[in-house]
Amino acid sequence: MACIMVMVNVNHHLGDRIELKGKVAPDAERFAVSLGQTSLDLALYFNPRFESEGDAGIIVCNLMKGGVWEEEQREPCFPFQKGQDAKMSFCFDGQQLRVTMQEDQELTFPNRLGLETISFFSVEGDIKVTSFEFK
Ligand code: GAL
C-alpha cells in the first residue's frame, strides 16, 4: 500500500484525540491508519478492506510488535464507501484505543503494547487525507 502520510515524534498522550478526514478512492481496495511507537511497534493498525486479501467490507485491526503481526481482531461494521468521504477519530485512554467512524460507529482495541504515549502515526492506501487535527 502506498504511504500517504507519516508522522513521527507525535507525542499523543492519554485522553488526546486525533481526528482524520479523507476521501476514499472510487476504486479503493483498502486503506490503513496506524498508531504506535515506531513503524514496527504499532499499538493499533486499523485496516478497512473494501476488497482485499480475500476480504470484502470488513475492518481488520491488529498490533505489530517488533515488526511481527499479532492476532487480528475482525470487525464486521463497515461504515465506509468507495468514492465517499470518511471521518475517523482515534482516542487513546491507556487501557484501549477507541475509534469513532463517521460520527456514530465505534470500535475499541486493547492497548496490548502498554504504551503511554503514541509517537508514530501513519495513513496508507486508497484514501486522500483532507483534514487532520489533534484535539
Ligand atoms: C496481513 C496483510 C498486512 C496487514 C495484516 C494485518 O494479512 O498482508 O498488510 O493487513 O494482515 O493483520
Image (tube, rainbow, N blue to C red):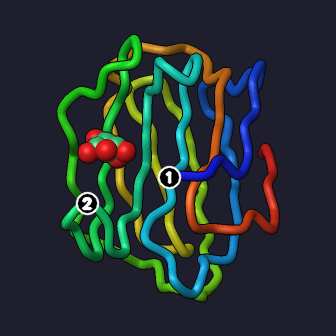
Q: Residue 43, position in %: x, y?
A: 44, 27
Q: Tell me which residue sits at (43%, 40%) in the image.
A: 45
Q: Secondary structure at mark 1?
A: strand
**Badge 1 is on which residue?**
32
Q: Residue 117, position in %: x, y?
A: 61, 18
Question: In the rendered view, does 19 fall on the left or right side of 97?
Answer: right
Q: Tell me which residue sits at (42%, 78%) in the image.
A: 79
Count of numbered labels shown in the rendering: 2
| Placement of 4 over or under 79, stated as above or below | above
**Badge 2 is on which residue?**
53
Q: Residue 20, position in %: x, y?
A: 69, 58
> Which quadrant of the view contains residue 67?
top left
Q: Around disc 2, counting alpha carbons within 10 Å, would you say few (fewer than 14), some (14 to 19), or many (20 or more)?
A: few
Q: Around disc 1, counting alpha carbons within 10 Å, would you say few (fewer than 14), some (14 to 19), or many (20 or more)?
A: many
Report how far apart the C-alphas of labels 2 and 1 lie in the structure: 14 Å
Q: Residue 89, position in %: x, y?
A: 60, 55
Of 117 and 85, nearer the camera is 85
Question: In the rendered view, does 85 fall on the left or right side of 45?
Answer: right
Mark 2 close to ligand 1, CB under 8 Å? yes
Q: Tell me which residue sits at (18%, 33%) in the image.
A: 71
Mark 1 close to ligand 1, CB under 8 Å? yes
| Placement of 118 over or under 16, stated as above or below | above
Q: Secondary structure at mark 2?
A: loop
